[in-house]
Amino acid sequence: TPRALGWLAWQRDVRGIMYWTATHWQEVDDPYTDPGTYHETEVVGNGDGVLLYPGAPVGLPGTPIPSVRLLQLRDGIEDHDLLTMAACAGTPAQVRALRASLLAAAPALDRVEPTAAQVAAFRRLAFDTLGPAGADGPCREPAG
């Protein structure tokens, strides 16, 4: 799931995410009906490299259409921000609990199949760690 990129980046203290391309659909006639958008030797990547779809086939010429992958990637970036703020605001014990909770959802780079309950659990723990200070806590730089 693209959402997990934010979690994995936070777990490993990665400072950014690069997605190789957002509109790689030129290998198919219609990316809406043929998901095999990436071909390399015997491997076909369904939707790989497609975060935005062309609007023309659905009556919106010149308008990019967001994919579910793009929306999941956005959610993962938001989760990364939440985890970062919670880790900054929390005690060492709270941060360890947060890392343990996230580890249950994403135990390894090749084992990321979280349940909805696992995602809800680490998000709830992060919000609880932030407490009432929320985004105005000690980790945010003053505006202006």
Image (cartoon, rainbow, N blue to C red):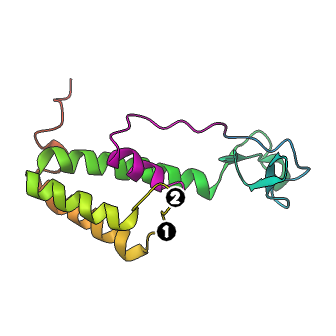
Residue designated by label 2: 110
Which amino acid, mark 1? Glu
Crowding around mark 2 (Cα neighbors within 10 Å: few <14, some 14 to 19, many 20+) is few
Image point (33%, 49%), residue name:
11
Secondary-structure class at tag 2: loop
- Check residue 17 for magenta coloring: yes
Residue 139 placed where, x, y %?
16, 38
Q: Please give left or right for residue 80 compared with residue 20 in the image.
A: left
Residue 104 x/y as whole percent:
34, 68
Is disc 1 placed on a helix, strand or loop? Answer: loop
Left or right of 45? Residue 73 is left
Magenta stretch?
1-21
Left or right: 75 as drawn, with respect to 69:
left
- Quadrant housing residue 16: top left
Residue, x 32% and y 40% (percent of image)?
A: 13
Type of amino acid at the residue the image marks with label 2: Asp
Residue that carries the numbered disc 1 in the rendered image? 113
Spatial CA span between label 2 and label 1:
9 Å
Give above or below for 116 relative to 55.
Answer: below
- Residue at 48 percent of width and 49 percent of height: 74
Residue 79, numbered label: none
Residue at 76% x, 41% y is 24
Q: How many marks?
A: 2
**Quarter placement of the N terminus:** bottom right
Residue 144 part of the magenta segment: no
Q: Residues within 10 Å of mark 1 (few under 14, many from 20)?
A: some
